[in-house]
Image (cartoon, helix red, strand yellow):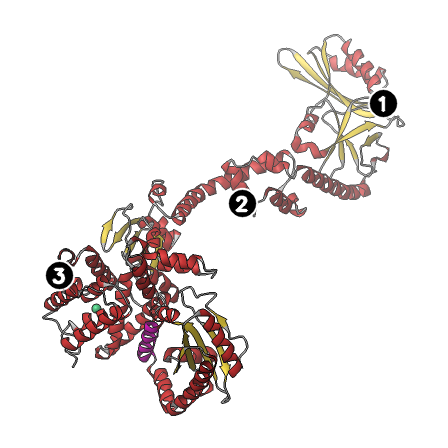
Amino acid sequence: METFHDHYTKLKKTIAARNPSADMQLIDRAVQYADNMHRTQKRKDGSPYIIHPLAVAEIVAEIGLDTDAILGAILHDCIEDTSSTYDEIARQFGQTVAALVEGVTKLTRVEYSTLEEQQMENLRKMFMAMSKDIRVILIKIADRLHNTRTMQYQSPAKQISKSRETMDIYAPLAHRLGMQKIKWELEDSSLKYLDPQGYDEIMQFVAAHEAESDEFMKTIQSRITTRLSTVGIHGSIYGRVKHVYSIYRKMKAQDKSIDELYDMYAFRVIVDSIPDCYNVLGHVHDLFNLVPGRFKDYISTPKPNMYQSLHTTVIGRQGIPFEVQIRTWEMHETAEYGIAAHWKYKQGIEGGEEKEFEWVRRLLETQQEADAEDYIHSLKVDMFDDEVFVFTPKGKVISLPSGSTPIDFAYAIHSGVGNAMVGAKVNNHIASYDQALRNGDIIEVLTSKSAKGPSRDWLNICQSNQARTKIKQWFKKEKREENVAHGKASFEGEMRRASVSMNLLQENDLVGILLNRLNFDCLEDMYAAIGYGGLTATKAFGRIRDEAQRASRQTLQKESAKANEHAAVKENRHKDSGVIVEGIDSLMIKFSRCCTPVPGDDIIGFITKGYGVSIHRRDCKNAAAANNPAQAARWVGATWNAAENKPFATTFEIDSTDRDGIWIDIATALTTAKVKISEISAREMPAGKARTIATFEVRNVQELDAIRQKIRNISGVEAVRRGQN
Ligand code: MN
């Protein structure tokens, strides 16, 4: 069993090699402190607990982090697992170290069940966000790396769940931070538990072909080495079988078995300068056959995680393809340790805490890579100040703008949840609606079917546009139904006034034209806008008025023409009606009973539904409707045909005193005027008055006026009016 002493010696050696200026005195004190705090605890394998923090510190030192990070690694489990506190650590080792330990503790406390793929990115972001200092996440990754190395002591269930987490969270984070070496180890050791069969198959294949592989790699290596020394380039060359998970992934992606998969060797040539990189590339292409389409220049265009190298795939005489990666030593350091390599570099030139990411940002600013910005976002911890990551009770991660409240959370879940919200719990405690959520909080929204919906105050409380929009929508929608009803009524009123029906609009495809002109998707939207006051019904109908009235007139004429055809069979058509109607020559003409026009009267025609054109006097009270826009389409101009000379029936309404025989006097007057009387009747009126209605035929208005004069002269007659029913 490994002892405390073994590990401590290894740690000190690594620190001496990678970080000679580290404060060993302080580190010694931290090791003693942690050893003391963890004294009663054992690892699963029975070794003293302190072995774990020492191993984590060694990984942290190996990737080149500073004294504070090494101290943080040594103390990383103290707050979580012992009686130690933030204050105690701050007092003994400073605020920075205490903050690092606290940060790691917070990450440890995040509980997450198995998550869906799209949740992973949020969770990774949350990790970054919770690590106010990038070193927190580096220590956490080192912690996980050591735990995967000692995974064999865990229960099978834990092996699988932890490996899943490692694969989903920690390996991508290591990749994001450019820590290739650690990423590979995390992936391979997770695969071992996630697909033991797949893992073993590759391991066995690799082992079975070890001799061949070694032989192959040696040959290639020596050919490159020989060429480089011939041309005087100083370089370090070595070959390797690619790591297990990358072979595994390729097999899955290409659906190939391991013996079909040739592309499993990678060679690395590390040289002193960038020009040498390109020179080596030329020599490699000269020595071997190029596989087209596989060359990538990550030197001129670094990967978002700062990785730089030239990649090419070639085929040797053996017919086996292999990849060659060419890079400088500095690029190599970056490829292995990622962000940590830059950390180290930065310490040499700047050292200021605030400048932490300046260097990275500057590097990235010069890059054209499309996702460079994404990378900054995922890397630059303070950039997450504008986001907060919280959990649903089921472990789903929700990302919200910082300062978000339970209201924002509820609407982020679903507008239905927000609208039905009656309260919220944060970490199992009832919370107020305006409580600001913090990273890692678990939020439960309490809903009720009888909820009254959002209140207007919520608009001031919520932080996310999403919530604000949805709350506004709710109010608009609640009103919308009213708005639509209101708007519909006004628009229909407008149509009625113009004697146009919705059917007519639809039959003539005018609805589409109308919506198009007004830029609405559907009638309901237009009604809502009218109801809302965004548009008047008059203006809306105005956009289609001319077309609608034309269509209406055409429809009426068609209907009348049809009716006319039927009527013509039974009745004589009034071809010789004595009236000319504007633009209409085939319709039946009728003279209205209400005003009984005669030639000489100013007249107007009304297109009836199915009974032709009815002729009114222009001063008929029924014809006054012609001024009504709703009827406008039905009224047509009409004139008397002077060529005709035939009698027309008309009616007089005569008011008189109720004396005996007055209607006989009236009848006599009509008879002596030689007009044909078709009807005459009289009735008593109140206050000793009488009213006589006489219908008779005249040829024109002059004849009528003469008759009127005669009747006026009859004793007792007080008024003579043209008849109106
Ligand atoms: Mn730990």
Q: Dot 1: within a 10 Å radius of its alpha carbon, few (fewer than 14), some, or many (20 or more) residues?
A: some
Three-letter code, disc 2: Glu
| Percent coordinates x, y for residue 471 in the rendering | 39, 45
Q: Residue at x 35, y 82 (%)?
A: 199
Q: Earlier in the sequence, mark 3 or mark 1?
A: 3
Q: Residue at x 29, y 69 (%)?
A: 63
Asked whether residue 192 is drawn in magenta, I would say yes
Three-letter code, disc 3: Ser
Q: Nearer the viewer, mark 3 or mark 2?
A: 3
Location of the C terminus by quadrant is top right
Q: Secondary structure at mark 1?
A: loop
Mark 3 vs mark 2, CA separation in Å: 66 Å
Query: Visible in this render: residue 288?
Result: no
Q: Earlier in the sequence, mark 1 or mark 2?
A: 2
Q: Which residues are magenta?
A: 181-194
- Mark 3, residue position: 84
